[in-house]
Image: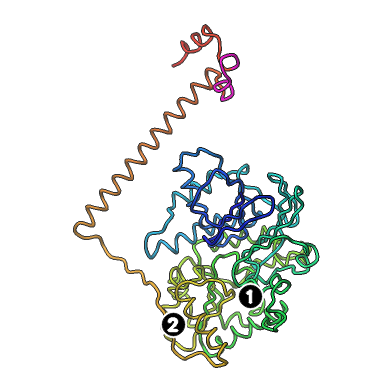
Amino acid sequence: MLRSAESPLTRTPNPDGFEKLVDYVQNSPDEKCLLITSASPSASFALPLLYRLWREGGKTYPFPTIISTAPVRKMTQLNLYDAFSSASSTGPTHTTVQDIDDVVGTLRDSSWVELKYSQPKVFHNVTISAKRSGCSVGGSYFVLNTSTPKSTMIYAPKYSHRTNLCQETDLKLGHANVDCVITYPGGTGSGLGNGVSALKRHKKIKKRMALVVRDKELTSSVHEVLKRGGNVILPVEALSEMAEPLLVLQNWLSVSNYSRSYRLCVCSNVGEEWKRFLKCFLEWTRLGDGFDGGGTNPFNLRGVEFFSSFDGVKEGGNDRPVVLFGTSASLMTGPCAAALTEWGGDEDNGIIFTSSQFNLGARSTLLKEWCNAKSEDREMVDEIEVKSWKVRRKFLEGEEVAEYEMLEEMRQEELKKAREKQAVANQIQSVKEHLGISAEEKGGGAEGGRKDEDENASDSNNLP
């Protein structure tokens, strides 16, 4: 059984008796593989929860092998901490920092398989290969082939929404005879959907713009807001999704000599770490195909300011208009929510969405109003009421103090017991190593696993 770390959706039959289970909450020993298509929280934020359920279940079966590209693995770790920090600022979450630490620290190379683009990997009689897809660094869709019976399946849940790096000809020519395509609702708007959708015959699908045209439209839309003195918010779900739009705007500001007039900011808890990571994985981006390595790394991002909170953006502005990239695409938590609360009342400011997928919170309200206006061939209304959480911190009072102290005492007690248990386990392991007892000997039976009694006695006498 192959499983995805996506949101719960449905069960779909696959070739060769496999079942596509898009429901990460229900653990099962039949699950052998976990596919992660991108480093965005919607594709990987269920991983700590899945690992915790497996751990609480007693680890009675091996944890499913995770398959992704190398950048997705590295960026997943950063995005998990960043998404948790944004989500926990407004209240409790379904995961904890300890869950994320367990996943990052426990899943070693043997549990996580990294693929290169178009590199086949045979796994349980299924050949899995990753194909480039999407504006997220390292984003991919998966092609699964079976030999007995011979069949091909494409798993592309976010293909329709990731248009910067799609290779449509690879899908149409290389996998024209696929038996099964798994995607999310709305996939008909992509190159993948264009080839199989009946909507194409009725002219319901517009031809997508070329990359150069989309880049020009992005810069012109941003410039329209900045030249009237407004600020621009560009919310993204994960840092890996802002790499190319950020570079496009940075080059535009530099070439147009606007660097001293406007500010380009990134607001995230792991912004500097992400910048260093991006330089190392240049070959996984669109620019990497034409970069010879002899010049300056294009992702040095000179002139881009990195902040850990929205307060830093407000303090060092000098009243210059700001282009703000921030995580938490729902506009409900994190720096984007703070920016919306601060700038939302001024009609000179603007919000630009680079993806049409995220359907939660204030973002869904704005996208719905925009879609309604386009469908009715009219302009959006001047005022739209949206709701966003605002964090208010206060000191604990009365019974809250006693409750907090009790919970903290319980937590410290659990940590103490865990350390004592680990110390006992280490001592037992040390004794076993001293006696020369291995795991094979312990389960090998009477003949293979039993040592001479005199030898055991002599070894035990030498114990401290």
Tell whether label 1 touches label 2 (CB within 8 Å).
no
For the rendered model, the colour scheme is rainbow
In the image, residue 265 above or below residue 221: above
Q: The residue under label 1 is which amino acid type? A: Gln
Question: For the view shown, which residue lies furthest in the right direction?
Answer: 173
Residue 353 location (% of width, % of height): 56, 77
Question: What residue is at 56 percent from the left and 72 percent from the top?
Answer: 357
320 lies left or right of 18 = left
Residue 161 location (% of width, % of height): 62, 71
In the image, residue 149 above or below residue 7: above
Instruction: Give the residues in magenta.
Output: 439-448
Circle 1 — which element? helix
174 lies left or right of 41 = right
Question: For the view shown, which residue lies furthest in the bottom direction?
Answer: 378
Q: Does the magenta run of residues contain 5? A: no
Question: What residue is at 26 percent from the left and 62 percent from the top?
Answer: 395
Residue 11 location (% of width, % of height): 57, 58
Please tell me in which quadrant of the rendered image residue 192 appears. Answer: bottom right
Residue to which mark 2 is pinned: 344
Question: What residue is at 61 percent from the left and 51 percent from the top?
Answer: 2
Number of marks in the rendered image: 2
Q: The residue under label 2 is which amino acid type? A: Gly
Report the disc number at residue 250: 1
